[in-house]
Image (cartoon, coloured by chain):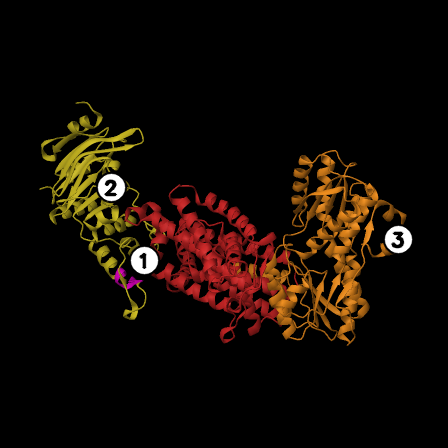
Chain colours: A yellow, B red, C orange
């Protein structure tokens, strides 16, 4: 059974139907590249997976359970994480605050006083995760707004990976990075596959998509136009599907 | 010296200053410059007036700052979430009048003065929150409307629009009593500040509030129920305005429908001087208390020196602009380096 | 960062002009509402004259507006820190200063109610002791205003009249309006007060009220305002509606703006309080009680109806006190 199973999902905004009945399956331990032109509906589709949008029709199943009507927090708890194109970080908060945003550990001082956020523990685990990602960050106590783009993305990635997710969606993760940073992100994705995670990679950079994915799914005007095995297709065919030449 | 050498030696001083700032910011959550300005101000006033440095004068300053202080706490919480509550002063006036009306006019037992004030404030805040989150009307508009509505209601409740005088002793004690020699309003202010500081700086609620103010999309994406949090914040803000109304009512032993006119602006000023950002994502209760004290010390000191209140207004306006300028100045310097 | 420190110091230094230290002369504390109104300016001049004559020092404080009640209370408390020989206060409303005045009682500092802003019933109920109230009798002033209107229109006159009151809940405004209304009913029952609305001592508000009532009652014959500021607002509206010669407008205070307007033929009359005299006599009476003498609990300072004739005639002896 697939880890993530989307059947017949329709999403409308007023009179406009952005998603026109999408079927998609993603297996654990695989990387799926999602490509398509601007306005195809990629970001809307992802938001119906993470729960920011609720599908008007259709079903979203994850890990055997129907999550179509669950809010974003509950879906995160079940192991769905997303790294946004704009990173969605709180720029004035520090690294640990961002990584644990929404699920801060808390403790009761002296056992009975009202609960306070366990900053110390957050800092330790944040540091550990940043080190594991092999990134260089000046200080985990600075507001993340002061970091470079690549460093900020590391924080966003750390946030997605800290709570042992099962599915990670990455929206244009390499778009604004330098060459060396791109390589490390692709290596990370490969590692995630090896660890048994499912990854959906949204990207305009078809070279990256070809390098790291198992399947390539083309979305066009709210419909799945093609679902291809990466090793059995080439760039020209994929581009053809994107622009609707078939 | 080569140009690279010069460039390297200059940032050192700024960097060291930045580190000291960070220390104050992270451990005590206070903006360092505000603390310095307060210290300088107190020193200057001590030099200029022999009446400044006395316990009774300090208690006077704290007493004079108590209603604004509570409102400034409300403003801090709302501003941190990138919200805005312009109805604070009017809700304060409405609450005090409502509480007094229940007890003096309707003859209910004295605890209703307290329940009535806090309840009226909470209700006004609740309405604000509902309109902002469900009807999706901008907070500026909703609270501006509530500013007029609450004030009108207060003037209706009070007979002939005059103050409702003569509250029972237990209520008056909340405003004029001196437990252990400290005026009751000061005690209430300190307790409120401690609770609010815990809330904003140490609880998950506070973190979510600041995150929401920093980047609402990020808060939503991480599963924070932004709408519910917003409703809670406005209700809390209204309740605090009700508390300020209660303090004022007890202090002057009258429900005054004209209480608190334009106090919301003063409250927001205190919060911003203390380091709360007008755009959300950054706020500190301790900082706000320092901001309120800066204004209180200025007013008190200039009163002692018999300087007319118009100069006080100029001074406070200037301090506000200066405080924000310092932040901007630093932020631009960092962006360049 | 050094810039900020010097800026802060510099700004405080600029404001440090009047570090008045307590001298050997007794120090009187005078707390007014606001100095924005020339009425209070004249009263301050009276206080100054009285203080000079009596050989005493005083320090005078005011707040930014007629409505800044809590700041006035805070200022009162701060003034007590300097332990004045007496507190002469013009309270913004009947209740706001009571906690401070009670403290003054405890400190054995006599309290004087300047210009009858405190309701004696309320002060008694609160247990606050007032050495004396001094001011014009506001009801008499209102009645004088009515008397003037009747003298102009005749006691058989008929028509609508507008009354613009003071700040809601302020006893001064209430007494003037009541005094006017009662005397008008007695002297010319045909003149009907069609509206009695609070103008909050505000020129703009009074102008708006006048506009609204003129629209409703175009045949309005007279307007009585509880102070000159509001009367001047009403005057502008009436003249803008081209009814300047049809409506009698009477204010109260007799301040310099009002006098100018009367001389120019716009404002019809003002019941001049003599704030200069009030200030001067307040200080004189304070000196008396501080030296152990006795003073009536209510000291009434007379009022004078100022019209163009009175001002230009120059024969009225009390004109000396009109500043």
Which quadrant is the N terminus of chain A positioned in? top left
Secondary structure at numbered mark 2: loop
Give the image location of residue A149, x and y in percent. Answer: 31, 46
Give the image location of residue C6, x and y in percent. Answer: 56, 61
- In the image, is A186 to the left or to the right of A115? left
For residue A138, which quarter of the picture?
bottom left
Which chain hosts label 2? A
- In the image, is B185 to the left or to the right of A6? right
Secondary structure at numbered mark 3: loop
Is residue A120 located in the magenta-colored stretch of the structure? yes
Viewer-side residue, A221 vs C54 = C54
Give the image location of residue A167, x and y in percent. Answer: 17, 45
Q: Are marks 3 and 2 on the same chain?
A: no
CB under 8 Å between callouts 2 and 1?
Answer: no
Q: Main secondary structure of the magenta part?
A: helix
Q: Which mark is residue B114?
A: none
- Which residue in the protein does label 2 denote? A174
* Residue for point 31% across, 28% down: A15
Which chain hosts label 3? C
- Which residue in the protein does label 1 denote? B204
The Cα atoms of the two marked residues, 2 and 1, are separated by: 32 Å
Of the two numbered discs 2 and 1 in the rendering, the one whose residue sits closer to the viewer? 1
Magenta highlight range: A116-123
The Cα atoms of the two marked residues, 1 and 3, are separated by: 76 Å
Which quadrant is the C terminus of chain A positioned in? top left
Q: Are marks 2 and 1 on the same chain?
A: no
């Amino acid at each position: 059974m697939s880890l993530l199973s989307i059947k017949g999902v329709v999403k409308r905004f007023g009179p406009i139907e952005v998603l026109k009945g999408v079927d998609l399956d993603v297996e654990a331990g695989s990387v799926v590249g999602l490509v398509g032109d601007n306005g195809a509906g990629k970001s809307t589709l992802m938001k119906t997976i993470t729960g920011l949008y609720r599908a008007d029709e259709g079903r979203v199943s994850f890990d055997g359970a129907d999550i179509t009507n669950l809010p974003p927090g509950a879906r995160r708890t079940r192991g769905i994480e997303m790294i946004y194109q704009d990173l969605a970080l709180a720029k004035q908060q520090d690294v640990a605050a961002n990584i644990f945003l929404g699920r801060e550990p808390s403790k009761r001082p002296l056992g009975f006083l009202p609960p306070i956020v366990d900053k110390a523990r957050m800092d330790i685990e944040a540091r550990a995760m940043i080190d594991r990602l092999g990134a260089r960050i000046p200080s985990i106590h600075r507001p993340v707004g002061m970091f470079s783009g690549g460093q900020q993305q590391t924080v966003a990635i750390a946030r997605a990976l800290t709570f042992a997710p099962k599915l990670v969606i990455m929206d244009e993760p390499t778009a604004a990075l330098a060459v060396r940073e791109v390589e490390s992100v692709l290596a990370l994705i490969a590692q995630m596959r090896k660890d048994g995670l499912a990854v959906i990679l949204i990207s305009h950079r078809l070279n990256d998509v070809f390098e790291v994915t198992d399947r390539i799914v083309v979305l066009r005007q709210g419909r799945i136009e093609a679902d291809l095995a990466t090793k059995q297709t080439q760039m020209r065919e994929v581009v053809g599907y994107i622009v609707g030449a078939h | 010296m080569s140009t690279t050498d010069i460039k390297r030696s200059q940032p050192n001083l700024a960097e060291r200053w930045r580190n000291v700032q960070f220390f104050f910011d992270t451990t005590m959550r206070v903006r360092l410059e505000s603390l310095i300005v307060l210290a300088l101000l107190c020193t200057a006033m001590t030099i200029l007036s022999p009446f400044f440095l006395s316990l009774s004068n300090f208690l006077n300053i704290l007493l004079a700052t108590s209603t604004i202080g509570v409102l400034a706490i409300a403003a801090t919480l709302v501003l941190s979430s990138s919200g805005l509550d312009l109805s604070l002063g009017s809700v304060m006036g409405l609450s005090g009048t409502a509480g007094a009306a229940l007890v003096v006019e309707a003859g209910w037992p004295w605890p209703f003065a307290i329940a009535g004030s806090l309840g009226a404030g909470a209700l006004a805040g609740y309405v604000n929150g509902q309109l902002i989150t469900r009807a999706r009307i901008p907070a500026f508009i909703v609270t501006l409307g509530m500013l007029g509505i609450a004030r009108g209601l207060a003037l209706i409740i009070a007979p002939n629009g005059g103050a409702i005088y003569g509250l029972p002793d237990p209520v008056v004690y909340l405003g004029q009593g001196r437990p252990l020699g400290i005026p009751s309003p000061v005690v209430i202010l300190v307790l409120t500040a401690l609770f609010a500081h815990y809330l904003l700086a140490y609880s998950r609620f506070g973190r979510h509030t600041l995150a929401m103010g920093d980047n609402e999309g990020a808060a939503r994406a991480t599963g924070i129920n932004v709408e519910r949090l917003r409703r809670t914040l406005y209700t809390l803000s209204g309740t605090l305005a009700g508390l300020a109304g209660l303090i004022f009512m007890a202090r002057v032993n009258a429900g005054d429908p004209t209480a608190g006119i334009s106090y919301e602006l003063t409250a927001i000023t205190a919060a911003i001087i203390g380091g709360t950002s007008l755009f959300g994502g950054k706020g500190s209760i301790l900082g706000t208390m320092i901001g309120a004290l800066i204004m209180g010390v200025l007013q008190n000191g200039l009163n002692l020196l018999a300087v007319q209140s118009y100069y006080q207004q100029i001074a406070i306006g200037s301090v506000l602009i200066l405080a924000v300028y310092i932040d901007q100045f630093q932020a631009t310097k960092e962006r360049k380096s | 960062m050094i810039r900020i420190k010097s800026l802060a110091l510099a700004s405080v230094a600029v404001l440090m002009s009047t570090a008045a230290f307590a001298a050997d002369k007794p120090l009187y504390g005078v707390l007014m509402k606001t100095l924005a109104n020339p009425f209070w300016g004249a009263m301050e001049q009276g206080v100054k004259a009285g203080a000079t004559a009596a050989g005493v020092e005083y320090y005078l404080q005011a707040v930014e507006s007629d409505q800044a009640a809590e700041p006035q209370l805070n200022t009162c408390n701060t003034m007590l820190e300097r332990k004045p020989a007496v507190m002469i206060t013009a309270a913004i409303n009947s209740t706001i200063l009571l906690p401070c005045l009670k403290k003054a009682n405890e400190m054995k500092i006599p309290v004087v109610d300047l210009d009858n802003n405190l309701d004696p019933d309320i002060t008694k109920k609160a247990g606050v002791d007032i050495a004396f109230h001094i001011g014009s009798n506001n009801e008499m002033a209102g009645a004088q205003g009515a008397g003037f209107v009747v003298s102009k229109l005749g006691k058989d006159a008929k028509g609508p009249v507008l009354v613009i009151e003071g700040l809601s809940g302020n006893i001064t405004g209430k007494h003037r309006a009541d005094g006017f209304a009662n005397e008008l009913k007695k002297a010319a029952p045909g003149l009907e007060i069609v509206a009695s609305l609070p103008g909050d001592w505000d020129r703009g508000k009074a102008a708006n009220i006048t506009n609204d009532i003129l629209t409703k009652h175009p045949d309005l014959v007279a307007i009585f305002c509880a102070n000159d500021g509001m009367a001047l607002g009403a005057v502008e509206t009436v003249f803008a509606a081209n009814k300047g010669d049809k409506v009698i407008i009477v204010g109260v205070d007799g301040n310099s703006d009002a006098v100018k307007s009367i001389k120019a033929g716009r404002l019809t009359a003002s019941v001049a309080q003599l704030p200069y005299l009030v200030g001067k006599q307040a200080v004189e009476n304070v000196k008396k009680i501080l030296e152990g003498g006795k003073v009536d609990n209510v000291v009434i300072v007379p009022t004078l109806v100022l019209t163009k004739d009175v001002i230009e005639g120059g024969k009225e002896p009390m004109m000396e006190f009109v500043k």
